[in-house]
Image: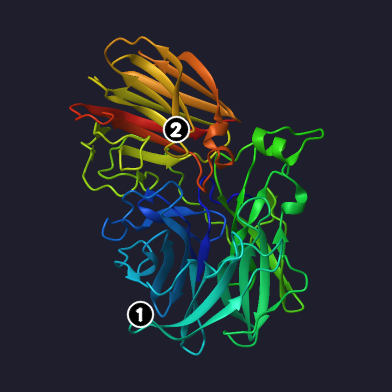
Amino acid sequence: MFSNPVIPGFHPDPSVCRVGDDYYLVTSSFEWFPGVPIFHSRDLVHWRQLGHVLDRPSQLDLDGVRPSGGIYAPTIRHHDGVFYMITTLMDEPGNFLVTATDPAGPWSDPIWFPEARGFDPSLFFDDDGRAWMCGSREKVFPRFNGDTEIWLRELDLPSMKLVGEESVIWEPVQRGGIWAEGPHIYLIDGHYYLLTSEGGTAEDHAVMVARADQVTGPYAPNSRNPVLTHRHLGLRHPITSTGHPDLVQTQDGDWWSVLLATRPYGGPPYGPATMAAVRAESGYNLGRETFLTSVRWEDGWPVYDLVQPEMPGPALPPHRWPAEPACDHFDGGRLSPVWNHLRTPREQYWELPGAGLRLRARPESPTGQANPSLIARRQQHIDFAARTVLDFAPSGAEEAGLALIQNDAFQIRFLRSARGLELIRREGGTDTLAASADLPAGKLWLGVEAHGQDYAFRYATEPGRWRDLAVLDGRILSSTTAGGFIGAMLALYATSNGAPGTSTATFDWFEYRSVG
């Protein structure tokens, strides 16, 4: 048995490929840098993060990117000893791919395809040696929001140019025909299969499959579409929004699929309620996560199993990786791959002097759409505890501390300023002081413990002598409240809030762990 999700926390739009006995998986990263986290597994259940595909500023310009903009829906494939990752930098300049011979990197600088309008690109390598790119896009003259189509065009690998004629191979057919996206093509037993999602990436998400005798089509839909959806199970089901899958065959011949889904929590468990009420009272603070489910074939079509919290695992030898330490002392010489920057860092505002983390207070703030002095990691558990210790002597408008961030307009900041200790709740771009306390000079211990949607904030001015400050509702950290496509991030930050900064914040360590 294994537990879903297999990669918890904000890891949406998974794509997977197998090379021998090894599996490699990438997910979307949106406005966070480095871009496209990459994972390695030998059993499809236990995954370790190798790093990121886009880890150099020359590869990824996120300057000024809006919340939930940036990198969408990467696809990873392996062909003739080379790994390919293709994705979209949304809004502009569009679709690009990078290559590597080692999935841990380094990966090349981007190769852009300005003529490939749209998003969610994918690659298919045919057994005749030809390569193809497909993707989703809104129609030139859309009739409604989400009026999309799936396109296909040949990719010449030596020149890395799109060649030949373009074909439109699919239009959405379900739920009013909106948002055909996340396409992947496979050649299985002499047939070409197109796997795509429709209905939007929320509770109506659904997976469609079509089949053709030629890669360019025509593609005939499965009469039993959708082959996977949880929309009929309702908003109280523990797993919703299933979709955006990618297929992989094990070395033993079995078929599995990774996909995104969400885990709503905090809403009313029983009794009559409208959909709007259930959605308003619950949230999925962890964002869209990576799940795994089994697939079997009947009459030439894939049959998906519903995605359950506990499921029978693949018939592969279990391969567990060494557990990561709960506490990061920042003593490894470089940041762990769990840490991320908000947009592309253009200057070195952080230091790792051997033990501890130093952040220089700069004018940029987590409440703006720039690159603040901040590193963040994903919330990965519904019930968790996080703690840190801060040494900071602010002046003027400076502040530093621990922040829980959904985006620039929805967040909670637990901070030290010249006024003392402050707990700031930010909703819709407006800050509200939720609680405060006077502080002596010296080190400050900050902690947050979440049980469901109750986030309890505690502090100490001496080791181990914790004091309760306040309990806040965590629903503002869910995209059901804040909008967008990401999950909550826990950040260490320092800012001078628009003025020149003179201070440095030192964090001795950061601890994150699941709690029962």
Question: Where residue 429 is drawn, which disc sits there?
Answer: 2
Amino acid type at circle 1 is: Met
Look at the numbered disc 2 and give the secondary structure of its residue.
loop
Look at the numbered disc 1 and give the secondary structure of its residue.
loop
Coordinates of residue 449 in the picture (x, y in percent): 51, 26
Give the quarter of the image for residue 252: bottom right
Q: Can residue 74 be seen by looking at this rendering?
A: yes
Above/below status of 81 relative to 347: below
Structural crowding at the residue carrying mark 2, measured as other residues with C-alpha within 10 Å and reported as few (<14), some (14–19) or many (≥20): some
Above/below status of 127 relative to 6: below
Colour scheme of the rendered structure = rainbow
Q: Can residue 315 be seen by looking at this rendering?
A: no
Question: Where residue 160 is drawn, which disc sits there?
Answer: 1
Q: Mark 1 or mark 2: which is in front? A: 2
Q: Residue at x 50, y 46 (%)?
A: 486
Coordinates of residue 186 in the picture (x, y in percent): 58, 77
Q: Residue at x 69, y 43 (%)?
A: 238
Tell whether label 2 touches label 1 (CB within 8 Å): no
Number of marks: 2
Question: Where residue 442 is drawn, which disc sits there?
Answer: none
Give the quarter of the image for residue 475: top right
